Image (tube, grey):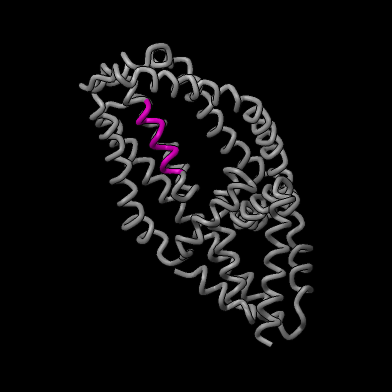
Amino acid sequence: MMTKRLYRTLIITSIIVLTIYYAGNVLMPLIFSGFCAMFVHPLVKRFESIGLPLVASSLIVVLLLVIVVGTIISLFIYEGTGIIQELPMFGVQEVMENPVDAIDKKVAINLESYREHIFSAVASFKEKVIAIIPETIININNAIIFMVSCPIYIFFMLISRSSIRKFYYTSFENKRQHMGNEILNEIEHVYIQYLKGLSYVMMIVATLTSIGLLALGIDYAIFIGILAGLLTLVPYVGVIISAAIPVAIAVLTKDSLWYALGVVGIFAVVQFLEGNFITPKIMGGQVEVNPLMVIVGIVIFGAIGGIVGMILTIPILALLKIIAKYVPGWKPLENLLSV
């Protein structure tokens, strides 16, 4: 009996993974929209409580969401364009044309013997940058489609919530509808608390990072701090991406590599505080997922859905953990995902 359950669980899991992999471009926006709809649902209910109809309440909330996200994206595009326009001032052209002399200015080491290797590495980097341009254009198109489709999905999910709930409950046998209700209530509670807590964590990380970079005299400190806060959404990978930008700016604009090391130190301290004090204090045990499974999930979902897949890693794993808690025979999966 146990063997049959195990085989059935493995088959179902394999089907889910394969479906997500081959239909990732379609499913990822739907999954992302589902989590967003769950997060803004209380706000829709608040508008309904003052007498607005469901459709109007949902439309107002979606428009507010679009305005907020659109404003953030516009600010990042504006700041990013500013950085790109100032690249010549940062000495990027000098590094590309004569990397040995440029690096020699930063470090007291004779790099003449490594001249050929350094030029080869820079040339290889240029080729790789040129090679990824077509892929970048495709990714931009996909991002535009994603940003247009998500608000539409969220709106229809909000106005169709009664139908979705009916479908959900009727998928359970009568004797198991109580279990279905418990699963749904726990999912809603956990995710709303998780997203609220994550918002506070992001603001604190952004503030601490900005203060540290300002103290060090790094250009675009506040912009980079906000970026670091937002990239907290992407576990482990986000901090690497957000740290790489100020490290590069420090190397290009400062006369000593100690500034770059200082940037690394700031990010290390902020991440230590975030992981050991800030997140545990604010979020408690709302979403505790095995770190190893998070890393594996980032690799899998990142391959399927890119940055969106990485952002959804913890919510999806937490969802599986909650379901495994209630479904007979899924106890091994719950244990695997638990801390």
Left or right: where does residue 16 sit relative to residue 321?
A: right
Q: Which residues are magenta?
A: 238-248
Compared with residue 32, is residue 93 higher up or lower down, i.e. above or below?
A: above
Compared with residue 175, is residue 322 higher up or lower down, i.e. above or below?
A: above
Q: Is residue 47 visible?
A: no
Left or right: where does residue 289 sit relative to residue 187?
A: left
Confirm whether the magenta stretch covers residue 244. yes
Q: Quadrant of the N terminus?
A: bottom right
Residue found farthest to the bottom:
1
Q: Is residue 63 visible?
A: yes
Q: Quadrant of the C terminus?
A: bottom left
Displayed quadrant of residue 251: top left
Marks counted in the figure total: 0
Q: Determine the residue positioned at 39% across, 22% down.
A: 117
Magenta span dominant secondary structure: helix
Q: Position of residue 309 (x, y in %)?
A: 60, 49
Compared with residue 163, is residue 245 higher up or lower down, i.e. above or below?
A: above
Confirm whether the magenta stretch covers residue 230. no
Displayed quadrant of residue 169: bottom right
Q: Position of residue 293 (x, y in %)?
A: 51, 61
Of 51 and 173, nearer the camera is 173
Q: Determine the residue positioned at 63% across, 80% down.
A: 329
Left or right: where does residue 159 sit relative to residue 294?
A: right
Q: Determine the residue positioned at 60% across, 57% down.
A: 42
Q: Position of residue 204 (x, y in %)?
A: 37, 46
Left or right: where does residue 7 sit relative to residue 251?
A: right
Q: Position of residue 170 (x, y in %)?
A: 79, 74
Q: Determine the residue positioned at 53% across, 65% down.
A: 190
